[in-house]
């Protein structure tokens, strides 16, 4: 008989936070962290929420990083000594919401930073939302569990089931015993990001274009000017925005 | 500065561009942003400027120099991820610091967006079971 996982009490939020850091969990590469972050930023923009963007993806520098799509994103370099202090710098400038896209391999630094700084951040009204992306690849589930193991109850969790194929098999996430224990204890809110056809995904990434630019026909790229592409971009945005509305308490204050 | 050094600096001419494509950089990047393929751009460079260049060289040139939304290219140095001296974060744009009132107003606005939405009443559905015996009768 399997040993039951230790139950971590999830603290009830007594006071509304005055700031929120929303970050993608680093770790497994290629699960769609930046693709999701890009749409998340578009959702915030659609609601006119003032926010700051931090691009912590040092491995994906020139193309496909958050700063490639949003030039206003600040490139930050995760380092052992300074950890995630850039969160603090940006919060200090006044942005109540930060979206940070972590690169692969950020785990150890984030771990140290949370151990050292989390209480201080919490006492200053900062809440954290950790976003984990699940794909049919079992490694994506392992990555989420690894991050959950050290973040524990210090963050709120959002899981995005990223349909990188159609259909997509999420049995690793849905049937794995440890994933089930994580869901029971951490109570993540789960949303879906529907399958995007590669012609749009790849072309937009190649040219640093957001889906908003495609949806609003602000591009000269032939494949993305097609009405079918425009309608698809509009549909992708609408469908994901509807999902984000369901979990907006993890994204706002 | 030592006058000899200054004279030497003045005498040494600027280096030539490392790539013969450098003079055409803006044109090439613009063509790429317009969605033209590398093959097509190679042909255009030949037709318009008499320049012969291979697709691989062109791809390498574009990859190294395309910074579609930045005014100045980033240095191509590998950033250390765990060791070395801490570097200050490099903001793409200066961050204006908000006043306490501005920040309070932003927080209030963001909280106003976080109100629970009213659950939509489900619309009456209609299912048609193909296997069910029909009871439609002629009036």
Image (cartoon, rainbow, N blue to C red):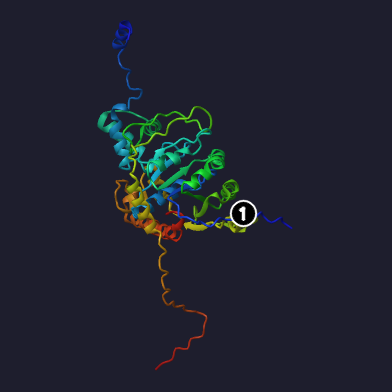
Label 1: which secondary element: loop
Residue for badge 1: A8
Q: Residue furthest top?
A: B4
Answer above or below: position of A242 versus A114: below
Q: Is residue B90 left or right of residue A145?
A: left
Above or below, A227 against B131 in this view is: above
Q: Is residue B73 visible?
A: yes
Q: Residue reaching furthest bottom?
A: B139
* Percent coordinates x, y for residue A104 in the rendering: 52, 41
- Quadrant for residue A71, please give it: top left
Asked whether residue A64 appears in the rendered view, the answer is no
The answer to which quarter of the image holds residue B76 is top left
- Classed neighbour count for the residue bearing mark 1: other residues with Cα under 10 Å, few (<14), some (14–19), many (≥20): few
Q: Residue furthest right?
A: A1
Front-most of residues B100 and A222: B100
- x, y percentage for residue B28? 31, 34
Q: Which residue sits at x=51%, y=27%?
A: B84
| Quadrant containing the C terminus of chain B in the rendered view | bottom left
Label 1: chain? A
Q: Position of residue A68 (x, y in %)?
A: 38, 40
- State left or right for residue A159 relative to residue B57: right
Spot occupied by residue A10 in the image (x, y as percentages of width and height): 57, 56
Picture layout, residue B77 above or below residue A95: above
| Depth check, front residue: A53 or A222 | A53
Report which quarter residue B92 is drawn in.
top left
């Amino acid at each position: 008989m399997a040993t039951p996982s230790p139950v971590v009490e999830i603290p009830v939020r007594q006071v509304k936070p005055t700031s929120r850091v929303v970050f993608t969990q680093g770790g497994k590469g290629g699960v769609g962290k930046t693709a999701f972050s890009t749409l998340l930023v578009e959702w915030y923009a659609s609601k006119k929420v003032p926010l700051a963007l931090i691009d912590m993806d040092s491995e994906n520098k020139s193309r496909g990083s958050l700063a490639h799509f949003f030039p206003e994103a600040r490139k930050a370099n995760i380092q052992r000594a300074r950890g995630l202090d850039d969160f603090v710098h940006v919060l200090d400038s006044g942005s109540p919401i930060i979206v940070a896209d972590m690169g692969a391999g950020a785990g150890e630094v984030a771990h140290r930073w949370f151990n050292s700084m989390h209480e201080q951040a919490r006492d200053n009204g900062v809440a954290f939302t950790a976003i984990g992306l699940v794909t049919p690849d079992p490694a994506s589930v392992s990555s989420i569990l690894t991050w959950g193991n050290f973040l524990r109850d210090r963050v709120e969790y959002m899981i995005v089931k990223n349909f990188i194929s159609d259909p997509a098999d999420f049995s690793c996430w849905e049937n794995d015993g440890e994933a089930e224990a994580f869901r029971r204890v951490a109570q993540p809110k789960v949303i879906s990001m529907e399958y995007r056809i590669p012609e749009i995904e790849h072309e937009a990434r190649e040219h640093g274009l957001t889906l908003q630019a495609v949806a609003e026909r602000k591009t000269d790229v032939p494949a993305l000017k097609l009405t079918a592409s425009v309608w698809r971009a509009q549909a992708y945005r609408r469908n994901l925005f509807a999902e984000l509305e369901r979990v907006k308490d993890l994204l706002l204050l | 500065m030592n006058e000899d050094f200054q004279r030497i600096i003045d005498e040494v001419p600027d280096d030539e561009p490392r790539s013969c494509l450098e003079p055409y950089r803006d044109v090439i990047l613009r063509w790429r942003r317009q969605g033209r393929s590398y093959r097509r751009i190679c042909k255009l460079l030949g037709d318009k400027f008499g320049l012969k260049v291979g697709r691989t060289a062109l791809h390498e040139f574009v990859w190294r120099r395309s910074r579609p939304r930045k005014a100045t290219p980033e240095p191509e140095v590998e950033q250390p991820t765990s060791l070395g001296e801490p570097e200050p974060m490099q903001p793409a744009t200066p961050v204006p610091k908000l006043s306490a009132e501005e920040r309070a107003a932003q927080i209030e606005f963001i909280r106003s967006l976080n109100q629970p939405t009213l659950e939509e009443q489900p619309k009456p559905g209609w299912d048609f079971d193909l296997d069910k015996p029909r009871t439609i009768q002629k009036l």
